[in-house]
């Protein structure tokens, strides 16, 4: 759940910060694989990036 939680936290706008771009969030997760994130889970996340992006875009705040 850490990968999904961090991705959501990074791309989501909060009252105290703007959301990051999808690409920046993915880069942070990629660099954290094997350190902050289980490498197998990070790899599974990366395998389904198009679907993740599609869902994130459909739920994004305007």
Image (spheres, helix red, strand yellow):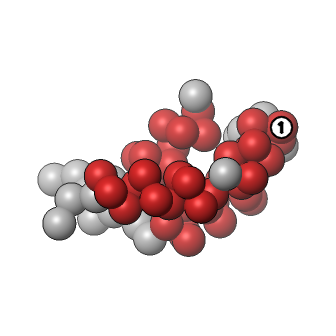
Secondary structure of residue under mark 1: helix
Indicate the quadrant where residue 38 lies: top right
- Left or right of 28? Residue 53 is left
Q: Camera-side residue: 45 or 9?
A: 45
Q: Position of residue 16 (x, y in %)?
A: 20, 55
Q: Is residue 32 visible?
A: no
Q: Position of residue 51 (x, y in %)?
A: 56, 54
Q: Is residue 29 visible?
A: yes
Indicate the quadrant where residue 57 lies: bottom left
Rendered position, 47 above or below 6: below
Rendered position, 39 above or below 28: above
Q: Circle 1 sits on which residue?
A: 40
Q: Residue at x 63, y 57 (%)?
A: 49
Rendered position, 46 above or below 21: above
Q: Position of residue 12 (x, y in %)?
A: 33, 54
Q: Residue at x 46, y 59 (%)?
A: 54
- Left or right of 36? Residue 49 is left
Q: Quadrant of the N terminus?
A: top right
């Amino acid at each position: 759940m850490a990968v999904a939680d961090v991705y959501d936290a990074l791309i989501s706008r909060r009252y105290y910060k703007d959301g990051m771009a999808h690409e920046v969030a993915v880069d942070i997760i990629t660099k954290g694989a094997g350190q902050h994130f289980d490498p197998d889970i990070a790899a599974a996340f990366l395998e389904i990036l198009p679907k993740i992006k599609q869902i994130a875009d459909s739920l994004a705040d305007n």
